Structures are given as C-alpha cells and as structure tokens.
Amino acid sequence: MICFPGGSIEPNEDFPTAIRREMDEELSLQVEVIKHLWSSRTAWGTNLEWMLCRRPEGQPPVPDPREVEEVFWMSREEILSHREVLGSMPGFFERIDTDPHWDRL
C-alpha cells in the first residue's frame, strides 16, 4: 500500500520527536517539523497524527529496505487516483480541503 512515512510513538516521545525518528529510520532524512496538522482515527481503530515537515534542500530519501519497499514522488492527484493507497490518505486530503483554518504553506 502507498502511504506517507510514519510509525508508532515510543514511550517518552512527543509527536515531533517520533516523526523525526521515523523519518530518519525509514528514509535517512533529518526533517524539521513545521507543525501538527491534524489528528484522525482510522476505521480499524489506529490513531494518526499528521505533521508537516521540511527536509533539507538537496537531501534525497534513502529508504531502509527493512522499513520501506519503494519511494515515490507523487502529486496529490496521483495519490488520490491510485488503487493501492492507504485508506486514511483520502480523508487527510478531504480534511485540508474543507478546513477553513487550513494554512497552506
């Protein structure tokens, strides 16, 4: 399934610390967390936290094959039209489209 990078929050971690660790583990990216965007819960009961991050310019992702099979750069339209996209992703895009307080950076 196609999805954004992510994972679980370990004991004594906050959301920004967890996403920085996960991005480093999965893609060898040292990201800057800009802000928390949204909290959601999947139909199967998993709590999700959606964060906006910035990677250093010129730093390509290097996937850890134990964590990530492939890396794709996709437009929003490509993500939403893909048949193997994780079910939580369309909800995220719907949320940012309908939230009047959404700040597009």
Image (cartoon, rainbow, N blue to C red):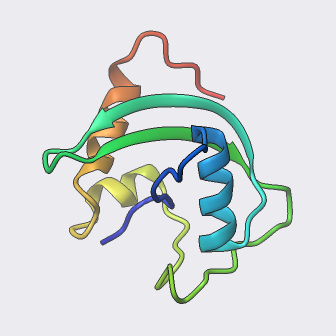
Position of the N terminus, as image quadrant, is bottom left
Name the residue nearer the viewer: 1 or 40.
40
Q: Nearer the viewer, residue 97 or 52?
A: 52
What residue do we see at 82% from left, 67% from top? 59
Establish if 1 lies above or below 23. Answer: below
Residue extending farthest to the top is: 100
In-front residue for pair 11/19 = 11
Residue 79 rendering spot, x and y as whole percentages: 37, 58
- Name which residue lies at 26% across and 47% down: 46
Residue situated furthest front in the rendering: 11
Name which quarter of the figure residue 60 lies in.
bottom right
Q: Where is residue 37 in the image (x, y as percent from the top left)?
A: 51, 29
Q: Position of residue 3 (x, y in %)?
A: 39, 62
Q: Residue furthest bottom?
A: 65
The residue positioned 78% from the left and 59% from the top of the image is 30
Q: Which residue is drawn at 54% across and 89% down?
A: 65
Quarter of the image where the C terminus is located: top right
> How many callouts does the rendering have?
0
Residue situated in front as seen by the camera: 49 or 101: 49
Q: Kindly indicate the quadrant of the structure image that contains residue 41.
A: top left
- Residue 29 vs 35, above or below: the answer is below
Residue 58, position as x, y percentages in the image: 86, 65
